[in-house]
Amino acid sequence: MERLKQILQRIDGKGYKAYRDIAGSYAGDGFVLHIDHVQADPFAAPSRIRVAFGGKETAADPEWLRTRCRRIAVEDFFARSIADSIRRYGIRPVGHGKSGMIAVDRPGQEVLPRTAVKVEEHGIEVRLSVGLPAAGRTVLGQEAARMLCESVPAILRQALFRYDRTRLRAHWELADQQEAIRAFLQARGYAAFVANGSVLPRESGISDRPMQGREAVPFRSPASLEVEIPLPHREPIRGMAIRNGVTLIVGGGYHGKSTLLKAIERGVYNHIPGDGREYVITDDSACKIRAEDGRRVEKVNISPFISNLPFGKDTRRFSTEDASGSTSQAANIMEALEMGTKLLLIDEDTSATNFMIRDARMQALVAKRKEPITPFVDKVRKLYEQHRVSTILVLGGSGDYFHAADTVLMLDEYEPVDVTEEAKRIARQLDDGRKPEGGDSFGDVTPRVVLPGSFDATRGKREKADAKGLSKIVYGTHEIALDLVEQLVDPSQTRAIACMLTALAKTYADGRTTLREMVDRLYAAVGEQGLEAVSPYDGHPGDLALPRKYELAAALNRLRTLNVKG
Ligand code: ADP
Ligand code: MG
């Protein structure tokens, strides 16, 4: 670190480019500082540094590394701890641009595998972004020395040595419990679990934090759907378990239907203690399906839902630059099935009505041969019986699904009531008068092979694959819009998707392997080597968090240049 100080002294007052000289590794007291990337100017993307602590104090407790989910939880804990420590340290801006900034990739409400912190047997490595201080474009060497040699080590010592041990333990014990619930659901044929006492509503429409205070009505399972799950580190937990099959969530407007579904949709991820949804656990292959008119579709077999389009357009290999509500929803389902989902989540609020229902009167007026759409109501049962894919659907506006449902749940002032028997009785007494239109079989899910050249990220001489916030990726000369991919939850996942797309293009797409197989192979590599395997950088891998394969595929499917074989 003395050497670093000397370099900084020497370049003090020089042009910003002189900062290049500090790239390298420096040994400090109990740590090694790696300066992996030096920003080109004070306004450019910040510099990337790593700090590796290797002393006895940061040696991992063997308990932390016993399982993958524990390691992820512990790394997540330290990332939060570092973010808190940075905030408490109170960094003041010292110059221009990003001068003086120190940041870690702070997680949100979900606990995701991320590159911010790496915990290993012998120590902890932290990945930070810093803004090297400048006045205008002049190096502020003194300030830089203070930041790198004093502030950064002080912040990290606070975060890594003086954290609350009870809270860390609670963090990974929760991960154990969440994993136990997942295993229980899988073994017993359940799709989702919502614990009694869960707080599902959020603070506001733009916040992911729990609603505070007495207004929030805690979840309580109807007796008929209640199960008890034994958990490690605590007493058993009770709550509502939704069986595999077809589940309908009904109830009056504003009674909490969408809020419940949203919580279930997020239950594919683990949440932090205090989130309110930490014991809401969903089959992690669950895919939220919605209408997304305007999206592009590339040779997807949507024939289970759509056929006989005007002008004989082929729906076994359906492509469009501008999907309609119903065709986009059909494509979203078929793409999720292609990737192997076992659970679809659908909300009437974000669905195309003509995709969901077609009632008796409409059947009488518009003949089947004039209507390309086979509504979901005629397929939902077959999807489960023939493909073992369950559906949970929010539908307050039509009783046509009653006969197809295994379970009907009614929300009454945010309280769920099991109304299955009543709904079945009503379905028997009040005939919906519909003629089933779905045929005998659900239809085929057709695997696709993507052509490698069709998602090349080069732009001019360079390669470009950058995330812009949560829902946009600039890829080559195109943009990928992910605004309506609702289970993408963290901008670091979006950054990872950008990297993963280029990895797919460069090493996994060979013009023969199917999309799903190719993605599975990439995930196998990431499972073994971590997200570092897809990072374009050496050293500091960038701020990445693992997306699910469904969101990665969703990004590829929305790329406007994508070309599928055949
Ligand atoms: P629906 O889909 O049935 O029309 P929503 O799920 O959109 O209803 O919920 C309507 C409103 O009620 C939202 O503002 C939501 O935050 C709030 N809400 C939902 N569940 C609860 C609850 N358990 N306690 C308090 N408020 C809730
Ligand atoms: Mg709603």
Image (tube, rainbow, N blue to C red):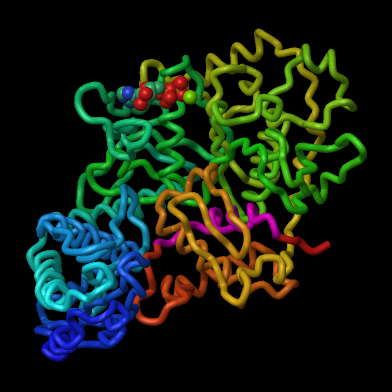
Of residues 403 and 443, which is closer to you in this image? Answer: 443
- Measured as percent of width and height from the top left, residue 524 is found at 52, 71
Task: Give the residue at the far top of this rendering.
Answer: 429
Q: Which residues are magenta?
A: 545-561
**Quarter of the view holding residue 539:** bottom left
Q: Quick check: 329 above or below 504? A: above
Residue at the spot x=14%, y=60% of the render?
91
Q: Is residue 112 visible?
A: yes
Q: Measuring 11% from the left and 83% from the top, which residue is drawn there?
A: 30
Left/right placement of residue 403 relative to residue 227 reads right
Residue 458: image location, x then y, percent: 62, 71
Task: Name the foreground residue: 310 vs 363.
Answer: 310
Could you say which is closer to the camera, residue 384 or residue 105?
A: 105
Q: Is residue 79 magenta?
A: no
User: Residue at image x 13%, y 64%?
Assistant: 159
Residue shown at 37% from the left, 67% from the top: 44
- State which quarter of the image contains the N terminus: bottom left
Q: Quadrant of residue 395?
A: top right
Q: Is residue 222 visible?
A: no
